[in-house]
Amino acid sequence: MIMQSIRISVFLFAVSIAANAQSFQERIADLDEKAAELQRRLHENELRLQRHSEVMEQAQARLKALQAGKQLPVRLKIPAAPPEPAHSTGKTHAPPPIAPKQRLPNKQTYTPIPTRHVEISKNNTYYFQIFSGYVMPNNAHISPENKVADYDNGYSVGAGAGIDFGNWRMGMELSHRSYDNSESGKGHAELNTLMINGEWEVGFWESNVFYIGVGLGPSLVKIQRPSGYWSYKKNLLAYQLSTGLGHRFTESLSGRFGYKYFSTASTNDFDPHGSHALEAVLEIDL
């Protein structure tokens, strides 16, 4: 009887140990499966982070290229996002290898085009201009009358055209100057001049220029005196010196304001007719 009880107890103990061993193995297998699932999810998260990082790098590179006025870099093909995790089947799978990170190609260097508000001038540009000014003439001695013509201030108008070579320009202008004698009834003087001009200019402060010029050409001088409508009328050689400042408003429109000294040659009848003038110029590039 005692032996039978011992046998039963040993059998039950063995059955209990076998059941506990089987339960322990199942727990170990379950832990392995959960560890594999965690590793797979960690790998998928690494792939997503890598993809997001590459997208941000490409966006930053394209933004910098747009700000610098450079050519946009080649858009790299970003790998698709990994699929959503599937339900576990109870089997453990080895995680796929992590793909190497793709790097952006070396940035190509481009020379950005410098931006300016308005260009000063273009090489070999033809121009047309009109001008008008305030003339302050010098007094002139009239030899036959042995008197001095005392002129009041007058005006000048004219137009010109030429070609701009950059810092140098050549052109022609046709101008008219007129001013009266200060004595009432003593007449006035008119000068019509065709001038060939040469000019040098230099730009500063984006759209501004400083210029100096010289001109030479024939001038028809007509002087009215009490003795007749045109008491004196002569074709004389004349010259002028000019300087001033200019500003370009648009690519084809600019303005100038400057000083001009003008003088004719002398004759046996009268002294040179010289004058100082302040002139405003409107210029159009053709």
Image (cartoon, rainbow, N blue to C red):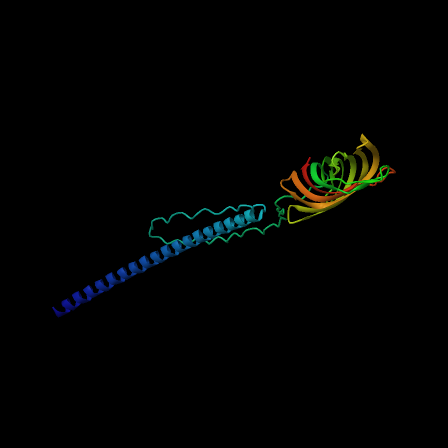
In the image, 1 versus 220, the foreground residue is: 220
In the image, 177 versus 121, the foreground residue is: 177
Q: Position of residue 156 (x, y in %)?
A: 72, 37
Q: In the rendered view of the protein, which quadrant contains the C terminus?
A: top right
On screen, residue 84 versus residue 152, left or right, reads left
Q: Position of residue 124 (x, y in %)?
A: 73, 39
On screen, residue 245 versus residue 106, left or right, reads right
In the image, 158 versus 155, the foreground residue is: 155
28 to 245, vertically: above or below: below
Total numbered badges shown on the rendered structure: 0
Q: Position of residue 188 (x, y in %)?
A: 76, 35
The residue sitting at 20% across, 65% down in the picture is 13
Q: Position of residue 262 (x, y in %)?
A: 77, 42
Report the residue that reaches farthest toward the left: 1
Res 191 → quadrant: top right
Report the residue that reaches farthest toward the right: 268
On screen, residue 282 versus residue 95, left or right, reads right
27 to 79, vertically: above or below: below
On screen, residue 246 versus residue 71, left or right, reads right
In the image, 250 versus 140, the foreground residue is: 140
Q: In the rendered view of the protein, which quadrant contains the N terminus?
A: bottom left
